[in-house]
Amino acid sequence: MKIDLPDIDIQPEWTEVSQLKKIAEEFGEVCEALMQGDPINTVREALDTMQTCKTLISMVQVEWNIDIDMFLKEHVEKLERKGYLKEGSE
């Protein structure tokens, strides 16, 4: 499964810290949905969490001029070392 999240228009009042708080809020909503045995909202809230994480990464990238491709490559290599990747998932 590959999930291609959209790029969103970062609002002027958003900061890295506010995004981190939003991630915590979204994570709490995932937990709540799981505890209620609600698979539909679990997926919806997990996608919201992922989108907020992507937004935070985008904000950090812009502010610090970070090459995300290098970090994605390192991330995949780490998953490979740990044996977490499915066959043909790269």
Image (tube, grey):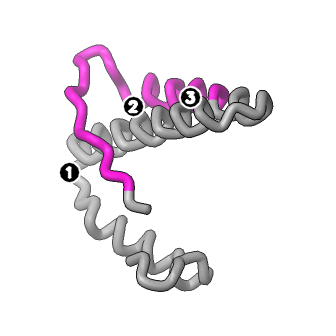
Q: Is residue 41 left or right of residue 87?
A: right
Q: Which residue is mark 2?
A: 16
Q: Which residue is mark 1?
A: 65
Q: Is residue 16 left or right of residue 78?
A: left
Q: Residues within 10 Å of mark 1 (few under 14, many from 20)?
A: few
- The part of the chain drawn in magenta is 3-29
Q: In the rendered structure, which amino acid carries the disc numbered 3?
A: Glu
Task: Quadrant for the N terminus, please.
Answer: bottom left
Q: Earlier in the sequence, mark 2 or mark 1?
A: 2
The residue depicted at 55 percent of the width and 32 percent of the height is: 45
**The one of 32 and 28 positioned closer to us in this rendering:** 32
Q: Earlier in the sequence, mark 3 or mark 1?
A: 3
Task: Quadrant for the C terminus, please.
Answer: bottom left
Q: Earlier in the sequence, mark 2 or mark 3?
A: 2
- Which label was assigned to residue 1? none
> Image height check: is 15 above or below 47?
above
Mark 2 vs mark 1, CA separation in Å: 15 Å
The residue depicted at 60 percent of the width and 83 percent of the height is: 83
Q: Which residue is mark 3?
A: 26
Q: Is residue 86 left or right of residue 39?
A: left
Q: Is residue 22 magenta?
A: yes
Q: In the rendered structure, which amino acid carries the disc numbered 1?
A: Asn
